[in-house]
Amino acid sequence: MTTNSLVDQAITILRGNDTGVFTKPGPHQYPHQWNWDSALIALGLSNFDLPRAQQEIRSLLNGQWQDGMLPHVVYHGVRSDYFPYAGFWQIESYPQAADVQTSGITQPPLLATVVRQMDARHSMQDFVREVFPAMLRWHRWLHTDRDADDSGLACILHPWESGTDDSPRWLKVMAAIQPESLPEFQRGDTRYVPAIERPHREDYERFIYLIDVFRRLRYAPGELLAHSPFLVQDILFNSILFRADEDLRAMAVDLGQPTDEIDSWINRMQQNFNPRFWEESTGLYYDYDMKTGQPIRVNTASTFMPLFAGLPSIEQAEKLVNDHLLNKEEYAPNGDMNHWVTTTARSEPNWEPRRYWRGPVWIIMNWFLIEGLRRYGYDDLARNIQDDTLGLIEEGGFREYYDVRDGSGCGSTDFSWSAALAIEMSTNT
Ligand code: DGY
């Protein structure tokens, strides 16, 4: 297949998932608007339809809460069989919520990085001027209402906020949560995707239990930080936030806006990121459990995400790449895994080749990794991973994730960000 026909097919997927207002991440499995999906979809769209890409971002920002939070799902009144359905979140009992239906949690803040990238390619100062204040309010919310220890690092309160929903890095934290009772619900996520590729029942029940806790706490930020049973500083989320802060700052400069506030976020993160997350003895970054005050010692591909943000030193980057990424017991293709890159190190006991975030290849993670490797001069390795990634999509179609052993597709079909990133990787390298 030629690159052109792959790009043509990707455009067809994005057009097919377009509701006119927003783009569904997947036609059946994800029928509403998801936050970080939408950012990547806008990036993909911007390569062939800039006005539509801008519309995608406006639609997402429509769901912003009064207090600045940008929710992980905006429902847009679309009727669907998706669970949790809009009313399940009960956000109307919280005066700071949006006046449209949304979820009550957030997702990794990729948007400012995407908007800056689009601006660099298309010079769209009017649009940047229009959306900058909303992005600034979201970042301010993350650096205040989600900063539990005045470190500049943001906390997440739910595995869905990490974007890597059932990553084994959350298992120990989740096991410590014992739901005293569960609201009534029926899972919808195994209707279109086999259960073996979706989260285990005990994890899913805890996902729903946490939403119930947040409803009872009325989504009040102080209450959530004080009482959420799940309170984690996530390396992936904070890497994305750091890079997005820098991108936001660059846009502020272009617009002639003050940068002091953004500078203070950047400085505090820069001071605290490595001391908090880096473990010299293993040469890995680990997430941090604020409840126990302990690092979460699980080796997943999130450990490479600081490369995307330029946070590791040259020596740290060498350790990450030489000791881990190229290690066949962990990430590098070997007889067992034939593709870049498993989302969980092969050596982890909870590795599973087809289950959601337990091991499959995700195009988004490969894209972060490729960008990060380029930043540190590992161009050949980045090229290898990119070729393998595009090959996976050509062979397996635009799937949500891929079995790392043989590249077969898993999860949703016609997945929008796999299409968006195929366009991005084919067009801009
Ligand atoms: C789901 O429904 O599994 C989503 O990942 C939650 O955001």
Image: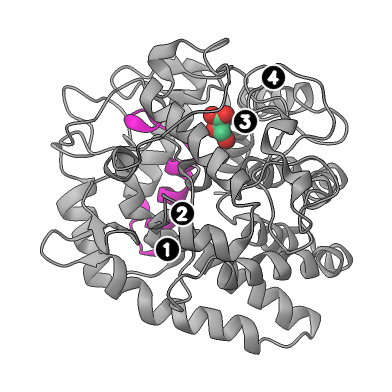
**Lower sequence index among marks 2 and 4:** 4
Distance between the alpha carbons at the discs numbered 1 and 3 = 24 Å
- Secondary structure found at label 4: loop
* 1 or 3: tag closer to the N-terminus: 1
Q: Which residues are magenta?
A: 357-379
* Quadrant location, the N terminus: top right
Q: Quadrant of ligand 1?
A: top right
Does the residue at mark 3 contact the one at mark 2 (Cβ under 8 Å)? no
Mark 4: few/some/many CA within 10 Å (<14, 14-19, 20+): some
Residue nearer the viewer, 19 or 167: 167
**Nearer the camera: disc 3 or disc 4:** 4
Q: Is residue 197 magenta?
A: no
Instruction: Specify the principal SS of the magenta part.
Output: helix
Q: Position of residue 6 (x, y in %)?
A: 61, 25
In the image, the residue with mark 4 has its CB under 8 Å from the nearest atom of ligand 1: no
Residue at 86 percent of width and 62 percent of height: 127
Answer whether residue 313 is visible to the viewer in this image: no
Mark drawn on residue 375: 1
CA neighbours of label 2 inside 10 A, class few (<14), some (14 to 19), many (20+): some
Q: Which residue is mark 3?
A: 419
Nearer the viewer's eye, disc 4 or disc 1?
4
**Left or right of residue 248: residue 408:** left
N-terminal label among 3 and 2:
2
The answer to whether 2 is drawn above or below residue 112 in the figure is above
Q: Earlier in the sequence, mark 4 or mark 1?
A: 4
Label 4, label 1: how far apart the Cα atoms are: 34 Å
Question: Compared with residue 170, is residue 346 higher up or lower down, i.e. above or below?
Answer: above
Residue behind mark 4:
27
